[in-house]
Image: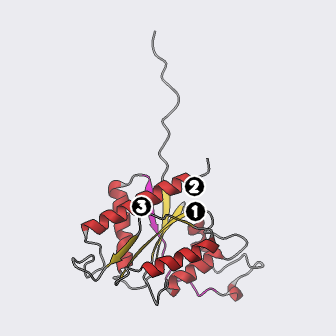
């Protein structure tokens, strides 16, 4: 008897869109380099994870006077930004440490995303990667976690990535590209943890 072929196609693997935000405006920033490395790692060895670098450098400063429709309408650049945040499945923040905190650029983006009747950030997984001096940007990461409590972001706890960029051996080249193999592997582990956590938070 001839076997009847199954009509059930194998399920396609879930592809998660990771919106990535760089808190630095500097062209050769280490944090831009971390996002570029994350893009490369996803293409090379993490199927099901896609990095979408969202440029936040052109957003106006958060100002309720710019809002319309009883606080639920926004300038075009802000509307486009909020659309990309809402479309993401999870987030990765690459944040320098400025005066024990995150940058004004990143805080401004977080504020715009939280405005309106419903926050764009709520109930999604997120990860933080930092680079800096003796603390590797860790104090900025801790402050971002505090902000995330109100935004209802769900940050992965482990592993952490706080790159001590001034220590030998060099972690980045002159263009801000990540060149240190061990740090690159640590970044890969962060991405894998983010992927696993985001899948756990997906609606069943």
Q: Quadrant of residue 59?
A: bottom right
Distance from disc 2 to disc 3, alpha carbons, whole Å, reads 15 Å
Q: Residues within 10 Å of mark 1 (few under 14, many from 20)?
A: many
What residue did someone put label 1 on? Answer: 124
Asked if residue 53 is among those painted magenta in the image, a careful observer would answer yes
Residue range (magenta): 48-62
Task: Give residue 162's position: percent from left, percent from top.
Answer: 38, 74
Q: Could you say whether the residue bearing mark 3 is in a helix, strand or loop?
A: helix
Are circles 1 and 3 on residues that touch, CB within 8 Å?
A: no
Q: How is the image coloured?
A: secondary structure
Q: Could you say whether the residue bearing mark 2 is in a helix, strand or loop?
A: helix
* Residue at x 27% of width, y 77% of height: 172
Distance from disc 1 to disc 3, alpha carbons, whole Å, reads 15 Å
Query: Going by the picture, which residue comes out furthest to the bottom?
Result: 99
What residue did someone put label 2 on? Answer: 201
Are circles 1 and 2 on residues that touch, CB within 8 Å?
A: yes
What residue did someone put label 3 on? Answer: 191
Q: Is residue 66 left or right of residue 26?
A: right
């Amino acid at each position: 008897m001839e076997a009847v072929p199954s009509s059930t196609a194998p399920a396609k693997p879930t592809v998660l869109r990771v919106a990535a935000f760089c808190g630095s405006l500097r062209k050769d920033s280490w944090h831009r380099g971390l996002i570029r490395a994350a893009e490369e790692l996803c293409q090379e060895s993490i199927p099901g994870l896609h990095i979408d670098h969202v440029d936040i450098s052109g957003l106006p400063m958060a100002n309720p006077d710019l809002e319309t429709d009883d606080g639920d309408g926004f300038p075009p650049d802000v509307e486009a930004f909020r659309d990309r945040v809402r479309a993401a499945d999870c987030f990765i923040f690459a944040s320098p440490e400025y005066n024990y905190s995150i940058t004004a650029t990143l805080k401004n983006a977080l504020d715009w995303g939280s405005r309106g009747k419903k926050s764009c950030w709520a109930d999604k997984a997120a990860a933080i990667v930092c680079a800096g001096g003796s603390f590797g940007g860790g104090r900025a990461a801790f402050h971002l976690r505090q902000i995330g409590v109100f935004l209802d972001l769900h940050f992965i706890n482990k592993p952490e990535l706080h790159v001590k960029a001034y220590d030998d051996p060099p972690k980045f080249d002159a263009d801000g590209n990540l060149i240190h193999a061990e740090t690159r592997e640590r970044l890969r582990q962060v991405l894998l943890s983010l992927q696993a956590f985001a899948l756990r938070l997906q609606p069943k």
